[in-house]
Amino acid sequence: MSNMKLIEPKVEFFDESKVTSNQHIARCARVCYGGEGKSHTKEQDDRLVQGLINKGHLSMLRHGSVYLDLSRLSKIEQESITSTISSNVFKDWGCVSCNMQEYMFGNVGDAIDDLREGSVVTMDAPEFLKLCEKNPEYFKSLRMTFCITTQIATSRELNRKSPNNIAERSTRYCSSKDGLDICKPWWWNDADEEKRNDYLKYMESAYTSYKDMLNLGFKPEDARGVLPLDTATKVVYTYTIKEWKDILDLRLYDKYGVAHPNCKVVMRMVKEQINKFLEEHDCPPEYLVWH
């Protein structure tokens, strides 16, 4: 297959509780340019995030998490904060999460500034996890980040449900001239040899066209038009556990229609990793995403 390779779909948990916010944001941002696999210093991560801020490229900050203790506020004050948060799962227990862009540059920060000083206590992920272990209801607001390797076609389906906490591998800036990864489709293991060979032949033909266009002087951002939708991509999503459950309802459990089998392959992995994480943090079984 020359430089074309068939790879497995994959889901990797980016645990924000084990790194600084800047390290987490930088790791997510580097997926866009294929640099997530290299080692980087804390100083490099800090510079990358500051560079994103200086350029006004704030969307990557949405992968960073801030947890707010609102228990000192009145009900009216609590509502003034929670009404500004895009992923609001606030009930009556006083803690809620938001993303770093909302907190630093959005309406959340503005709303906090309008309140008396010290009335809102901010926490990072490790601090919030300790509260979650004491009160499992808090887990609904816990934000979790997954880096999903899948087909471009599948990422498009997942992106349509998104509140836009997304970082995806760029086909503009990441050229496939030295090799193309095709993400194995859901039917591959059950297909006969003839069907597999025909599929690979069609993928190889598309890849040959892509390389021919590059050789003719087309830029990767233009040559990508002939890449197949089964071309592998990496895409990072950060959602609260409540939001992940809603996505699983749609993309794994067919709540509003039958989800594509390729979606179910990766969403099943997401579900398993969420539940594993919750179990490791002593979350009672009734609070798991799906049994």
Image: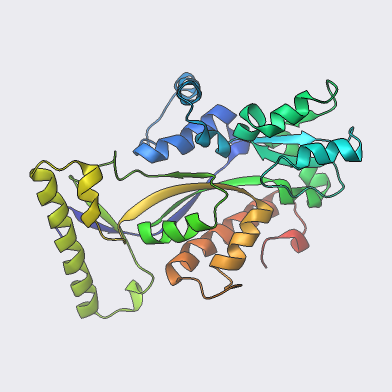
Q: How is the image coloured?
A: rainbow
Is residue 130 visible in this depiction of the protein?
no
Residue occupying image coordinates x 45% and y 35%: 29
Direction from residue 89 to residue 160 in the image, left or right: left
Q: Position of residue 179 (x, y in %)?
A: 20, 49
The quarter of the picture where the N terminus appears is bottom left
Q: Nearer the viewer, residue 80 or 90?
A: 80
Q: Looking at the picture, how far across and down is residue 16, in whole percent? A: 59, 38
Quadrant that contains the C terminus = bottom right
Number of marks in the rendered image: 0
Q: Which quadrant would residue 221 be assigned to in this image?
A: top left
Left or right: residue 129 versus residue 161 is: right
68 w.r.t. 137: above or below: above
Question: Looking at this view, is 170 or 37 the one in front?
Answer: 170
Q: Residue furthest left?
A: 216
Q: Nearer the viewer, residue 116 or 32?
A: 116
Q: Visible in this render: residue 81?
A: yes
| 197, above or below 154, in the image | below
Q: Residue at x 24, y 53 (%)?
A: 225
Instruction: Specify whether 73 is left or right of 197.
Output: right
- Left/right of residue 38 with respect to residue 98 in the rendered view: left
> Which x, y percent locates residue 107?
68, 33
Residue drawn at x 83%, y 26% is 115
